[in-house]
Amino acid sequence: MAIMDLNSPVRGQQIDSNVPLIARDMRTTAKQFFDRGVQKSKNGDYKGAIEEYSQAIKLNSKYAEAYNNRGADRSRLGENQQAIEDFDRAIKFKPKFVDAYKNRAISRSDLNDPKGAIEDYSMVIQLKPNDVNAYSDRAISRSSLGDKKGAIADYPKLIQLEPTKIGRYVFRGDIRAESGDKEGAIADYTQAIKLQPGYIEAYFLRANTRVELGDRKGGIEDLEQALKFAPDNKIIAKRLTELRSAIGK
């Protein structure tokens, strides 16, 4: 969850000398409550932080950052529905509030609302086109809904942004394998192996995918290679024995 730690109640907002002194004092006090909330949250006192943010909101009912932070700490305590209500208010008062959309997406996912999460991740991407986590999390949400095509569609941008991150290729390979694109899956596992030659999981996954395509010999070669890197791995050794027995080797 993203916690905002700002120097003013609203980003870029300056104290207006023309505002009556009482109003200026009220605004400053709201900021003090907000800062206390940030510190308590950092210390793991989420209930205390929520109380501080609530006080800040009483003094500044349009304090978007306070709503966002209170929602984040409520989510940490498992109060996801209340958290979503806070994120709703944060977005109402600050429509381009990227962190609030991210946080709401997480709470929606926790409440088993992947469609709602996808909407929020899409808004994050619209506001911040190079946000890696938004693409990754949207792909996961899409995959959970069975939208394998949509999940795969997020990966070209992900890989463009993080071309050497092995997990991106492995996860896309898994989705491709599940959707029936075995050749595409093998290509992804192969790329993962190129990036990290000792990555035994990629060898194991590629071996199983090759076997599913009828290439038992290729599967055996992958498992033999994996065992060179992890000679004590019982799962790989068992799978290799099964394949060898199947072809009488």
Image (tube, rainbow, N blue to C red):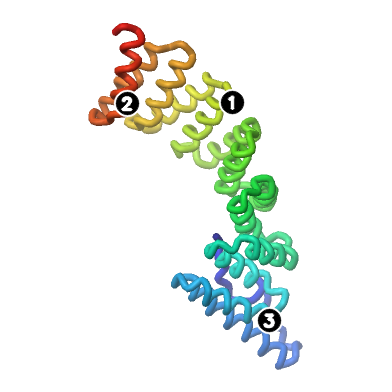
Mark 3 residue element: helix
Q: Position of residue 188 (x, y in %)?
A: 49, 27
The answer to whether residue 61 is seen in the rendering is yes
At label 3, the amino acid type is Lys
Q: Which residue is identified by label 2?
A: 236
Q: Nearer the viewer, residue 20 or 106?
A: 106
Q: How many marks?
A: 3
Question: Could you tell me which quadrant the N terminus lies in?
Answer: bottom right
Task: Please report the residue visible at 59 percent of the width from the left and 68 percent of the height from the top.
Answer: 69
Dot placed on the residue nearer the N-terminal end, 1 or 2: 1
Asked if 18 appears above or below 125 in the picture, the reply is below
Q: Position of residue 17 (x, y in %)?
A: 72, 88
Q: Determine crowd level at label 2: few under 14, some 14-19, many 20+ residues with C-alpha closer than 10 A.
A: many
Task: Please report the residue visible at 53 percent of the width from the left and 79 percent of the height from the top.
Answer: 36
Please give the label number shown on residue 62.
none
Q: Which residue is identified by label 1?
A: 179
At label 1, the amino acid type is Ser
Mark 2 residue element: helix
Dot placed on the residue nearer the N-terminal end, 3 or 2: 3
Q: Determine crowd level at label 3: few under 14, some 14-19, many 20+ residues with C-alpha closer than 10 A.
A: few
Q: Determine crowd level at label 1: few under 14, some 14-19, many 20+ residues with C-alpha closer than 10 A.
A: some
Q: Position of residue 175 (x, y in %)?
A: 55, 30
Quadrant in which residue 201 is drawn: top left
Q: Which residue is identified by label 3?
A: 58
Mark 1 residue element: loop
The answer to whether residue 194 is seen in the rendering is no
